[in-house]
Image (cartoon, grey):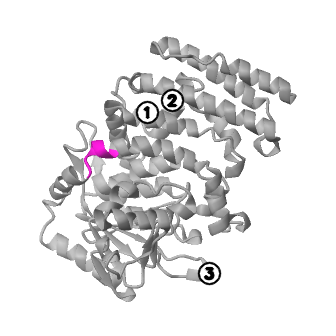
Amino acid sequence: MTDNVLQQAVKGWARTAPAHATELHADRAGFGHFWQRSMELLARLPAKPKRNAEEAAAAAEILALARESRTRFMRAHARGVYDSLTGKRSLFVRVDELCARAAAEYPGLVPGAKELERESGLAQRDKDELEVDQGIFLSQLFADPLAGAHLCHAMLLPRGETHGLLPGFMKTGKISFDGAHLERQGKAAVVTMRNPKYLNAEDESTLAGLETAVDLALLDPKTEVCVLRGDSVTHPKYARRRLFGAGINLTHLYQGKIRYLWYLIRDLGVVNKLYRGLALPECSPEEDSVEKLWIAAVDGFAIGGHCQILLTIDQVIAASDAYMTLPARKEGIIPGVANLRFPRFVGPRIARQAIMMGKRLDCDSPEGRMVCDIVVPPNEVERATMKVCDDFTSSGVVSAASNRRAFRVGEEPLDTFRRYMAVYCREQAYCHFSPALIANLEKHWNAANRKI
């Protein structure tokens, strides 16, 4: 396609954009046709790395206009779309399945399986950013109070495989997954995060296993408290040392191996379950839930996502040589729900310094002790953790769940979390594909030269 023909085709398509949203059924057809044409135009262009300046500009215009129309459609129809995908909120559907249903029922609204598969093998910089449309879709769902609250509820329910695994775990007291190991130790359910090759970093290989381990730990009737810690690693620099965790796997992020929905599944699922417990299908998570006290044992460091996790924990025990960082500026992404939760611990100024300026918080420092409850010598972390477990369980933990809920009423009601996620879904989608993210990873992580 010559540049002139391309420009005329894009201009002709742009003139067909639906001007206003009307009724859902009619808009599904009208907007859907416009979105389908956008994908056809995009498919006529060379692959992103091979586009010349005019072709790149045309692709950017196509994507931008189509996203504007998707935003307009969802602003008008978010609740209607959600109700149609969930049987008027009679079905609990997780975000990944919800996006798959939307792709089938509203063609063009979000990328379908074929489009996602086509981009999945590409480096992050070479993708056409189709997953941004998932962010637009989910952002508008969370902006609707009823749809957003129902989706939060869905993500707080146990994963589909959890109940089938529970009898085996109750019998043996241990179970392993990719990314995590769960073991009953006395009255404590100990979840150990595992990704030894990558300093216990989080990625697509660890997410499902860690969430299922947390589900089982909360459901285990033989334990009263839960412990979260990192395993020893094999990385040459820290070989055989325990580390709490290095956050998101930046190498995999740069290589395009982490999908946008990973962030949402993580923060709505496992991280929110650490904070709110497991929801029950018959009532709001704020009314009742399955909860236990969580104790974290921090060895080495808690970077990025692992620092975010500490903000959901009831008692944090840290080694005196350990530290915490939220290097969002160097990574180019939003650090999960830390922007909402971190100021409650250290105040808004230090939170901004950590998130926006890369400030390091040593656990054994005044700022670090605002997050860490107990700081001990590195060789005392194990003993101190077990002592805290014994202290809690010896006096009974009958009021633990009640007190956790009572704190959340003032700290972070579910509706506050829902509103945060409405912003987070949209902004993180754009961050995930920003050229600045690629530049940051190459500058601060040397990502282009890392092979694993």
The image quadrant of residue 94 is top left
Q: Earlier in the sequence, mark 3 or mark 1?
A: 1
**How many other residues sit within 10 Å of disc 1, few (<14), some (14-19) or many (≥20)?**
many
Residue nearest the observer in this picture, 169 or 428? 428
Q: Tag on residue 102? A: none
Span of residues in magenta = 412-417
Residue at which label 2 appears: 71
| Residue 174 shows in the view | no
Q: Tag on residue 140? A: 1
> What is the x, y in percent for residue 222?
24, 62
Q: Would you say the residues marked 3 and 2 are in contact, meaning their CB atoms lie under 8 Å apart?
A: no
Q: CA distance from mark 3 to mark 2?
A: 47 Å
Q: Earlier in the sequence, mark 3 or mark 2?
A: 2
Residue at 56% of width from left, 14% of height from top? 29
Residue at which label 3 appears: 236
Q: Is residue 80 above or below residue 367?
A: above
Residue at 84% of width from left, 30% of height from top? 3
